[in-house]
Image (spheres, helix red, strand yellow):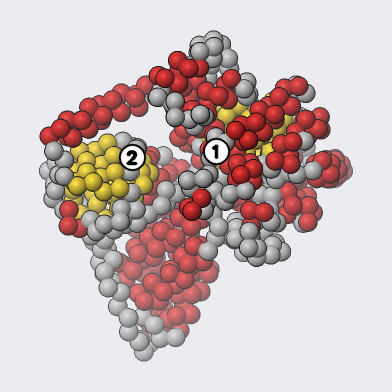
Amino acid sequence: MKELFGKGVSKGIGIGKILFFKNTLLDIPDYEIDNVESELDRYHNGMELAKSQLGEIYDNACKRVTKDESVIFKTHIMILEDSKFVGLVESAINKHKNAEQAVYESAIKLANMFKQIDDEYFRARCNDIIDASHILMQILQKKNEPTNAIDENDPVIVAATDLFPSDTISFKEDHLLGFVTNDGSQNSHTSILARTMGIPSVIQIHEPLAGFNGRMAIIDGMLGKIIIDPDINTLALYQGKRERYLKQQQRLKNQIGLPSRTKTGQYIRLSADIGRLEDITKAKSNDSEGIGIYRSEMLFMSRESCPGENEQYDTYSTILRAFGDKDVVICTINGGSGKGMDYVDIPHEKNPALGFKGIRISLENPDLLRTQLRALYRASVHGKLSILLPMISSMEEIEYVMREIEKTKHSLDLEGEQYSEDVKIGVLIETPAAALISDEICKKVDFITVGTDNLTQYTLAMDRDNQKLADFYRPYHPAVRRLIKFCIDSAHKNNKKIGICGQLASDPAATLHLLTFKVDELIMIPSNILTIKAIVRETDADDINNTRNKYDLNSYFL
C-alpha cells in the first residue's frame, strides 16, 4: 500500500482502478515554411474548424453542467479570436514559422503574461489558453479525432500529468470515479468542472502517475490523498467513509429553502462572495440569500483598457436583475500592483499588500471612480444595490467618496437618468486602523463588512501567501477575534448591520463563535453556503460546547 499526497480540489471519495490518460498534444513540428500566404490560409482555416469544434464541445457541456460552467468553451473561442493572440501567431508565420509552432509559441507567450498577474484566478486561466490552442494544434496536425474515450467496462480514476477542460468534459460521468493530476490549480476550469460534476479530484501529486496505470486505488478529495493498492482494512474503512459522505451530501441538499436559523431562533444571513457573472448560478443553486460582495475588480483586470460606463452598467444590472428583491453588495474597484490594470498608473511595488490598492486607486483616479459610481447608480433601478468601499483607513476617505456620490446623483438628475434613492453605502473593514475607528465609521455609513483575510495579515504583520509563515499564521489569533468583536459591537451600538467575509466566514468552528458574537451575515464562496447553513441550523446558541463536540471542533479557538 502506498499513499500519495496532493491538494484536494473537489470533494468526495472514489474507489477503483487507475487509468492513466496521456494527453494527445505530442511533439509540435517546428520547421521553416516557404509560402507565407499559404501557411496563413492554413492557420485561418484551422482556426475556423477549431471554433466549430469548440461550439460542439459547448453544446455537449450544456447537457451535463449549467450554461455558466459551459461558457468556458465559448471563452476558448474568444481566446482564439483575441487580437493579441492572432497578432502573435500571424507575426510568427510571417517570420516563416509553421502554423503549429506559431500557435504553440504564441499560446505560451500569452499564458506567461497571465502567470505574472498577482491573482490566482487569472493565473489559472493559463490552462484555458493552452487548451484552446491545443485544440487548434490538433486540427492543424490532423489529429482532431477523439482520443480520450474510456474503453474500460468499469468506472476508473483518471490520472494524468494535467487535464484540459475539454478533456474533463469529454469523459462520460458513469465511467468516472475521480481525477488525479501532477499539475493543476484550484481555480482552473478543470477543477471547477470536476466540482460541478461532483467528481473527486486531487491535483499537484509530486510523483509520476503513469506507473500506477491499472492498479487499484482510493482517491480522497477532502484530504487530497491517493492510496495505491489499499489493503482490506483500508478498503473497508473508505467504503464506509464514502457511504457517510454521500449521505452528508444529501443532507446538505435538504437544507435548500430552509431558513438559516439556530435552534434557539437566532437568524444569520448567508450570502455569496463572487467575482464573475458565471458565479450567479452557483450562488442561486447553493441557496444564497443574495450577494454579500461582488468583487468588481475582476471586471477591470487583465485587459488593455478600462471598461466603459455602459459595459459596467450591463454587468451590474445583470447581477441585480438575477437577485430581484435580494440585497446585492458591489465593492468598488479593489485592484493593485500585479492585477493586470496597465491602463492605470499603478507603480510596481515590493509589497503590494501595503501599497497602492483599494480605495486609494479610486481617490487618485477620480474619473475611474466617477465612471463606476455612474454605472452603479444607473444600474440601481434593477434591484437592491449596496455599494462597498474597500481598504478604508480614515474618515476622510469615506467623506471624499460621499461627496462624489452626491455629485454623481446630481449629474444623473440633470441628464434625466433614473436611479434608486435607496442605495446603501458600506465600508469593508480590512485594516486594524479601520477596525479601531469602526464606531465612528458606523455613524457615517449604512453597514460594514469585515474582510478577515486582510485584517488577519495586517494585524499579524504576516503575508498570508508566504509559505514560510504558514506555521505562524493564525486566523484565529485572539487579537483578530478582539478586533472583529469590537467591529460587531460598534455596528450594533449604532443600529447598523455587519457582515463577515473571508476565510473565517466559511469556517465551521468560526461560525460557532461568530454566532455568539451576534454577527448579522456571513459571506462566502457559494459552495460553502449549505455546509454553514447545516451548522447554523443544528446549533444551540446557548450550548456552543455541545455543537463543538458534535462537529469535533475543539482544536479551534483555544
Q: Is 164 left, or right, of 370 in this rendering? A: left
Judged from the image, the secondary structure of the residue bearing numbered disc 1 is: loop
Residue 331 marker? none
- Residue furthest top in the image: 264
Residue at 22% x, 32% y: name it. Answer: 238
Residue at 34% x, 38% y: name it. Answer: 222
Determine which residue is flagged by label 1. Answer: 475
Residue at 19% x, 47% y: name it. Answer: 2
Residue at 36% x, 89% y: name it. Answer: 34
Question: In terms of depth relative to the viewer, which is nearer, 149 or 114?
Answer: 114
Q: Is 155 left, or right, of 276 in this rendering? A: left
Cβ atoms under marks 2 and 1 closer than 8 Å: no
What's the distance in space between the residues labelled 2 and 1, CA to CA? 20 Å
Residue type at mark 1 is Pro
Question: In terms of depth relative to the viewer, which is nearer, 338 or 488?
Answer: 488
Residue type at mark 2 is Leu
Residue 526: x %, y % from top left: 49, 35
Nearer the N terminus, badge 2 or badge 1? 2
Q: How many marks?
A: 2
Q: Is 368 left, or right, of 468 in this rendering? A: right
Q: Is 317 left, or right, of 437 in this rendering? A: left
Residue 223 marker? 2
Residue 434: x %, y % from top left: 73, 39
Mark 2 crowdedness (10 Å alpha carbons): few <14, some 14-19, many ≥20: some
101 w.r.t. 538: above or below:
below
- Front disc: 2 or 1: 1
Location of residue 354 (image quadrant): bottom right
- Residue furthest bottom in the image: 34
Residue 200: x %, y % from top left: 31, 40
Residue 201: x %, y % from top left: 32, 44
Question: In terms of depth relative to the viewer, which is nearer, 209 or 110?
Answer: 209
